[in-house]
Image (cartoon, rainbow, N blue to C red):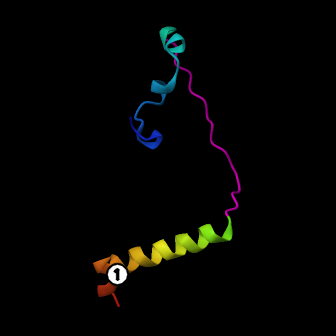
Amino acid sequence: MRAAATVTDPADALPPAVLATGIRVAADVRLDAAVRLPEPVGVEMETAATVLARRNPAASQSH
């Protein structure tokens, strides 16, 4: 089983009956949305970014 973000052909998720028609239709499903996360999520993101920055050897050499 693969994570959804690693699927290479989006049509793989379609039911076999749809694929049997041989017709492929493309649709633009992009959305413009604003997402609000709880404050603790922001704190965790900042912490993770700080840890990654400190572990990056190139970042420590540039100072």
Residue 52 picture location, percent across and down: 39, 74
Q: What segment is highlighted magenta in the picture?
A: 22-37
21 lies left or right of 40: left
Vertically, is 29 above or below 33? above
Tell which of 2 and 12 is nearer to you: 2
Graded by Cα atoms within 10 Å as few (under 14), some (14 to 19) or many (20 or more), the crowding at tag 1 reads: few
Residue at (49, 26) in percent of width and height = 13
Q: Which residue is mark 1?
A: 59
Asked whether 35 falls inside the magenta stretch, the response is yes
In the rendered structure, which amino acid carries the disc numbered 1? Ala
Q: Which quadrant of the rendered structure holds the C terminus?
A: bottom left
Tell which of 1 and 10 is nearer to you: 1
Residue 60 picture location, percent across and down: 32, 85
Residue at (54, 14) in percent of width and height = 18
Residue at (41, 41) in percent of width and height = 6
Vertically, is 28 above or below 56? above
Asked whether 15 falls inside the magenta stretch, the response is no
| Magenta part, dominant SS | loop
43 lies left or right of 47: right
Tell which of 56 and 32 is nearer to you: 56
Residue 1 picture location, percent across and down: 38, 34
